[in-house]
């Protein structure tokens, strides 16, 4: 089976959704024409929708199941995609063109790749975050409020709650449009303890933060990818590698020193040595201890250099993720924007007259440190 997988041939069983079997003129040893696995364009389009909505719009499996059904996307049996099926699809590494049999995995076969590797990996990260870390990343992004759960009163520190209201037309007919407000319930209950406003227009606040984020992404795009990544670890990595090289030289020199002392042992026994037996023994013991210490230092220095190397790879992935947000954000749906904002922003503090402070998440702050080393770690807005 492992040989079949490495050659990119289907090993049998149920064909995953997104693919189909088709004879392409290949015959087995018994001279029977065998099936090849190919991408099914129509099904593959649905697979891409599932991954994109899960990663970019915050859809959970149940919500995806309902959305697909209401939009006419059915499985091969003509019924809705069950949420368990969707989870299995999101976990299926075959969609990036990798075939698997037990512990054996193939290289990526481009002709079998339905979703990009980075999109698949991001889906796995989100799935792990949702199951292991108490929904640090939201399962879905329902609702019309862009900043739900992220807005805080700058005066008392309380989290603002969403409230809705609808007015009436002149003839008494109910208005269809619902107005959203971010309300400080602490101010409502304890007006003497909070000198902020009781509430803020949801449409206005969302609009302001939306523009702030668009400008923020424009600033991020000004620095080339290589420049940001190079600034992140270049100096530290150079120092770490230099330390490794110096320790390797010192370790080699100490080994040579120890060997020279060992050669003196025979001379000392014969009475022709330069050192007495006691002194030579002390020198050998001291050099051995020095060698052990250097070996430990060298191991630690190599580990540090390796960590910095792997960290640079992680930072590169983080940069790519943020730049993906930058490209997607302005044209995204409300669901897509909410998903991005929950990973970009830690909290939004709002005070009287719409004085706003947007606090960014730590990974985003790191990039701001490189773009503007002397700058603030928050973004401010004050009404003119």
Image (tube, rainbow, N blue to C red):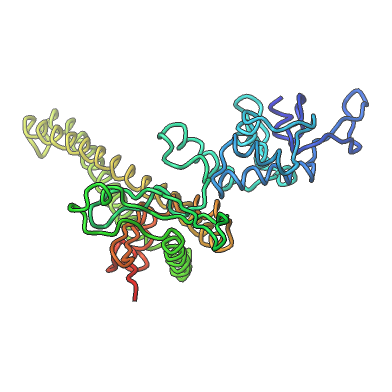
Vertically, is 247 above or below 214?
above
Q: Nearer the viewer, residue 50 or 166?
A: 166
Percent position (x, y) of residue 329? Answer: 53, 60
For the point 62% across and 24% down, the residue is 102
| Quadrant placement of the C terminus | bottom left
Is residue 104 toward the left or the right of residue 222 in the image?
A: right
Q: Nearer the viewer, residue 238 or 66?
A: 66
Percent position (x, y) of residue 234? Answer: 36, 60
Q: Nearer the viewer, residue 346 or 14?
A: 346
Q: Is residue 125 visible?
A: no
For the point 51% across and 61% down, the residue is 326
Is residue 9 toward the left or the right of residue 226 in the image?
A: right
Vertically, is 126 above or below 191?
above
Residue that extends furthest to the bottom in the rendered view of this protein: 384
Q: Is residue 45 visible?
A: yes
For the point 92% across and 26% down, the residue is 32
Percent position (x, y) of residue 213? Answer: 44, 63
Percent position (x, y) of residue 306? Answer: 38, 45
Vertically, is 373 above or below 118?
below
Number of numbered callouts drawn: 0
| Quadrant placement of the N terminus | top right
Quarter-wise, where is residue 357 in the image? bottom left
Is residue 192 toward the left or the right of residue 78 in the image?
A: left
């Amino acid at each position: 089976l492992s040989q079949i997988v490495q050659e990119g041939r289907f090993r049998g069983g149920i064909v995953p959704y997104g693919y189909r079997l088709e004879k392409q003129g290949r015959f087995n040893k018994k001279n029977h024409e065998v099936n090849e696995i190919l991408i099914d364009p129509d099904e593959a389009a649905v697979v891409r929708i599932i991954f994109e909505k899960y990663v970019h719009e915050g859809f959970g499996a149940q919500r995806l199941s309902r959305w697909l059904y209401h939009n006419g996307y059915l499985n091969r049996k003509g019924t809705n995609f069950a949420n368990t099926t969707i989870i299995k699809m999101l976990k299926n590494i075959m969609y990036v063109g990798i075939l698997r049999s037990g512990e054996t995995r193939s290289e990526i076969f481009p002709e079998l790749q339905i979703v990009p590797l980075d999109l698949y990996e991001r889906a796995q990260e989100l799935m792990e975050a949702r199951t292991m870390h108490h929904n640090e990343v939201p399962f879905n992004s329902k609702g019309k409020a862009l900043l739900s759960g992220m807005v805080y009163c700058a005066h008392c520190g309380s989290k603002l709650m969403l409230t809705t209201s609808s007015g009436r037309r002149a003839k008494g007919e109910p208005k269809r449009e619902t107005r959203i407000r971010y309300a400080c319930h602490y101010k409502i209950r304890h007006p003497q303890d909070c000198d902020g406003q009781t509430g803020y227009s949801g449409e206005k606040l969302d609009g302001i933060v939306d523009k702030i984020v668009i400008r923020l992404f424009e600033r991020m795009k000004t620095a080339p990818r290589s420049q940001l990544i190079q600034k992140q670890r270049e100096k530290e990595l150079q120092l770490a590698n230099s330390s490794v090289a110096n320790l390797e030289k010192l370790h080699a020199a100490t080994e040579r020193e120890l060997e020279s002392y060992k050669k003196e042992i025979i001379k000392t026994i014969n009475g022709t040595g330069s050192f007495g037996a006691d002194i030579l023994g002390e020198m050998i013991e001291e050099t051995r201890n020095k060698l052990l210490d250097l070996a430990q230092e060298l191991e630690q220095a190599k580990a540090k250099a390796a960590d910095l190397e792997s960290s640079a790879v992680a930072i590169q992935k983080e940069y790519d993720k943020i730049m993906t947000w930058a490209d997607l954000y302005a044209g995204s749906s409300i669901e897509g924007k909410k998903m991005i904002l929950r990973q970009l922003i830690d909290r939004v503090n709002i005070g009287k007259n719409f004085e706003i402070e947007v606090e960014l998440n730590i990974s985003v702050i790191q990039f701001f440190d490189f773009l503007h080393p002397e700058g603030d770690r928050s973004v401010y807005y004050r009404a003119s």
